[in-house]
Image (cartoon, grey):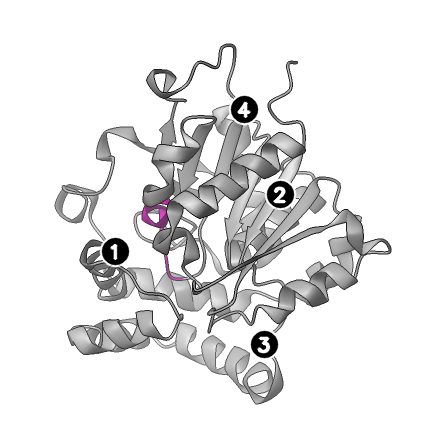
Amino acid sequence: MAERLDWTRDGRDWPHREASQFVEAGGVRWHVQRFSRDVSATQATGPAPLALLLHGTGASGHSWVPMLPWLRQHFDVMTVDLPGHAFSSLPAARQSTLPGMAQAAGALLQSLGAQPEVVIGHSAGAALGARMCLDGHVKPGLLISLNGAFLPLGGLAGVVFPPVAKVMAALPFAPRFFAGQASDPRSVERLIDSTGSTLDAEGRAFYARLVRNPGHVAGALAMMANWDVNPLLRDLPRLAPRLVLVVADKDLTVPPAQGTRVRSMWPDPSAVELHRLKGLGHLAHEEDPAQVAALCIEAARAAGVFAPH
């Protein structure tokens, strides 16, 4: 088994370490961070709505840190490392499927007694959030997709990549090989550049720490090898919560045109909001957290999330 990140060693300087907890649920040992609404920054009273934040493939809960100062003015916030990523354990193959991961995440919420009123998902995290909603594991009033990866890979990549990922995930030496490649700082720079985003030195350093760890790479490979978004694509128009799609015009990972295609699947496309961000890439929420957070807060306000209960 590939060596995983060690919380005592690798998590000593992890952002908001004091907010971390580890929870066994759904066959996964989850790394969870929970934040209460910052009452010093708002005059809001009463219980705060809970926002669940789901990162994308190859990332971790750290990717939401830049947005927290704004989100915490309005929400209680919960972030997780997805199964196999960063400090969460690698599950059995059946739990690395999209429905399996959704079920495991639902078990986590049930274990914590958490009932998110807003789910914000980035890339594959948006697909996971949608699957959780469709399967009844979470019942928010609003699902926000940030550069959501709802569609299968197109063209030759869609034919070749999934089988290759399955082979790589099955080879015990593959995660160590890819992590070793990332020891070259230039390879990490190229990886981030390939998203169309520009991150500061701190943001790049956290991704470097992740992709240089064989266990984290194994988790990302397992996720890519076992996910099939085609059933999700068929089910999307049955989504119960309000859906807001956010795309970035410089995204080189998920073509922004996918947002228009996903929206067109609804009988009434006007029921789905679509926002376009200019000058930002796939990691838009890390590049311009204030703008993306403001969009999320306004979407929650429009959806009635802040209405008195």
Residue bearing mark 2: 143
Where is residue 170? Give x, y as percent. 42, 74
Q: CA distance from mark 1 to mark 2?
A: 26 Å
Q: Amino acid at mark 1?
A: Gly
Q: Nearer the viewer, residue 199 or 10?
A: 199
Q: Earlier in the sequence, mark 3 or mark 1?
A: 3
Residue holding disc 1 = 203
Within the magenta stretch, is there residue 11? Answer: no
Q: Residue at x 37, y 66 (%)?
A: 197
Crowding around mark 3 (Cα neighbors within 10 Å: few <14, some 14 to 19, many 20+) is: some
Magenta part of the chain: 58-64
Q: Earlier in the sequence, mark 1 or mark 2?
A: 2
Note whether 23 is above or below 254 in the view shown.
above
Report helix, strand or loop for mark 3.
loop
Q: Which residue is mark 4?
A: 49
Marks 3/1: CA–CA distance:
27 Å
Q: Is residue 59 shown in magenta? A: yes
